[in-house]
Image (cartoon, rainbow, N blue to C red):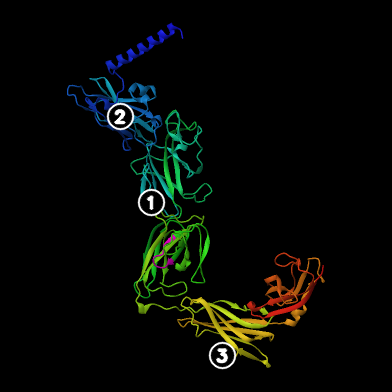
Amino acid sequence: MPNYKKSLLLHLKIIISALFVFLCIQGPVMGTYRDWADEKSHFQGMSLTVTWDPAGSLNLLEWSELIVTDDNAPPPTYVVYRKFGYADRLTPGVQVDSSPFWIQSPQNARNNGWQFVGAYDGAVIAIDKPGPNYGTWSYIVFANLQATNQTTRSNIDVSKFVHSLTRTDGTKDSVEEGEEETGGQWQFNQVWNIGYNLQTNAFTNITIFSSNTVINDFYPTDSYGMYIATGSKPSRPPQVIYQMSEDAVRSFEMSDGSWNEFMIWHCTDEMGKLVPRGIYMALVETWVPRDNPFPDCKDDDMALRGTELISIPVRGPTIKEFTTKGIKAFGELAEINYNINCAAKAKMVVAKPFTEFKKATTDGSLVYLTTEVYDYEVGDPLPLLAGSTWQVDADRILSYKNAINDAGWNAFSWDGRTDRGVSCGRGIFRVAISATDAFGYHTYDTEGMITDSIAVDERIDDIEVDRRPPLLQSSTPQSDSVIRHSLSKIAAVLTDPSGLDTNNTTITLEGPDPDNPVLRKLYTQNDVGIELAVTGSTPHQRQFTLSFEDAITLNGDYQMTVHAVDTQGNGEIYTIDFSLNISESEEAFRESLRAYPQPADTGMLKFEYRTMGEAHITIEIFNLLQQLQLKVLDNSYISAAGLHVSNPWDLCDESGNKLPPGLYYYRVTADYTEFSGEKFMGFKKLVIIE
């Protein structure tokens, strides 16, 4: 770089530094802004509050007067400025203690569109009547201390066109805009009242936006700073759920109380369907007829005066209150009362003492008390295994009920017994409830599962015993079945929550008499060659089997009778009718056996056999020394009677080696014993060649 250029740059730096030092020495000049905090030796700061007075249709401005610590200094002077809308894009309704640098002095304010309201000497209250230009106005106060030529300012405060914006639920508890909403939304049929007060007659539109909308999705206009959702492109366009508009001007009259206005949202979308739970944003826009002139307008006839944002929580089906009443004496009923905000299908589960619950995450069903079924949906209560936080235990359920209820107070009752009629006795039992509305939305509860306890304090001698008889769960043979093989046993599976009386429960069989076709014969456990056996790992479920040493082979109609008795003395008689129609014998089975082609050399050998009904089939290959070579079929299940053909056999043993040429035997076994029959068996020869 040439020397003369370097010299020029050096002289410029020196001049700039000298000017900076000079300005610092001279101090502030008239109109220069300096925060009051820098001059605490002279005066202390002020704060501004703006209040709308509906009776006088005016704004009341109040600020704290500056405290001058210098007794010789003259009192400060105050000037008030205002600007239409939310000045400098301030968040609606938020009072700030600082503002952007361009409104730090009266000159800055005037340059940025602020209007002069008035000048005051020592006063702390000013009155501003904004009409005819009613609307949302922002205010600021500047104070000048003449002794030091210093200017300070207050915070910016806003007087809204829409005053006291509230959301009111069914309990009539109002929540001011900006306050935190706690608890739930309890209005029956899920109604929100959006209340507001206006400065003057105006039309009001309210738009509801989706629950994923946030305040950053809205933005202020460039001209007046009020938040809108139309116009320039926001970060993402908010999704409109529902819109409400006025067909007539809302009045601002004060004398008859009509200053308080409401619009109602039923928590539905434009199609009338209840919206899911969530926090929704509501944009309130107010428009004034053009005959009250103002330059910012919606169309040729209307001018926009104010916009406000408010959040609205939608809780969906909600149980607000839940109370229980126990049983203190014999004959009383426990009461489970709940207050719900809409019509819904409610469910109640009563469980054993100390039971904890969790919410179901899938639909399903639980079998409890052996035969009872609890069908649950996502969100319904599930009883947990003792000590577990995740494992469900159906055995803890004692009673389950469901009902379709209306909005308001509803109740379940419980008699202190299980759903099988067994008294639960004394104890503190657990209860949980849930509900689902017609749109499939489930109850919401901020505390988790909706549960409580029920105390039962009956006297021991008053406890009602089980009055229900045992239940026949299954029988072999089944009712109206046809048995096509000999009968060697019959069986019945019984269940009872009180336990089965194995000494007094009996099974008998009645059928044709082999000695006299005109008579009927009764088979009982007391007959020679007949035995009754009882099996089962729990006293609440047993299998009773009547076995015949000599299998029954006489065709005809039979009736099985089960006399079931429980430990409480309750009894029930069950009858099962079936018939026996044996059309073939073991000899016929052996005659049906065939292996082809023979002699075998292709590795495609098939076995053919005929069965009388359900059976397990085994096909085995033996050599001349009757040594087992392999099993072609091993206990394979056949579901029906008729002729059957096996899959091809490749003539190889279990190691995959082809059997040497020679003479072999094959044995086919048809096992009917699992199905109350016999076991048929047949041997035949098999020749394998090269």
Residue 67 against residue 634 in the figure, above or below? above
Residue wearing tag 1: 183
Q: Which residue is tagged 3?
A: 526
Secondary structure under the numbered disc 2 in the rendered image? loop
Q: Is residue 472 visible?
A: yes
Residue 385 x %, y %: 44, 64
Query: Measured along the vertical axis of the image, is residue 495 above or below residue 238?
Result: below
Q: Quadrant of residue 543?
A: bottom right
Region of the chain picked out in magenta, as a range: 350-357
Mark nearest the camera among 3 and 2 is 3
Q: Which residue is mark 2?
A: 154
* Residue 399 shows in this picture: no
Please state if 27 lies on the left or on the right of 318 as rendered. left
Q: Nearer the viewer, residue 690 or 531?
A: 690
Q: Please say whether residue 295 is one of the residues in the magenta stretch.
A: no
The x and y percentages for residue 75 are: 21, 24
Task: Give amino acid for label 2.
Answer: Ser
Q: Is residue 251 above or below residue 73?
A: below
Q: Amino acid at mark 1?
A: Gly
First along the sequence among labels 2 and 1: 2
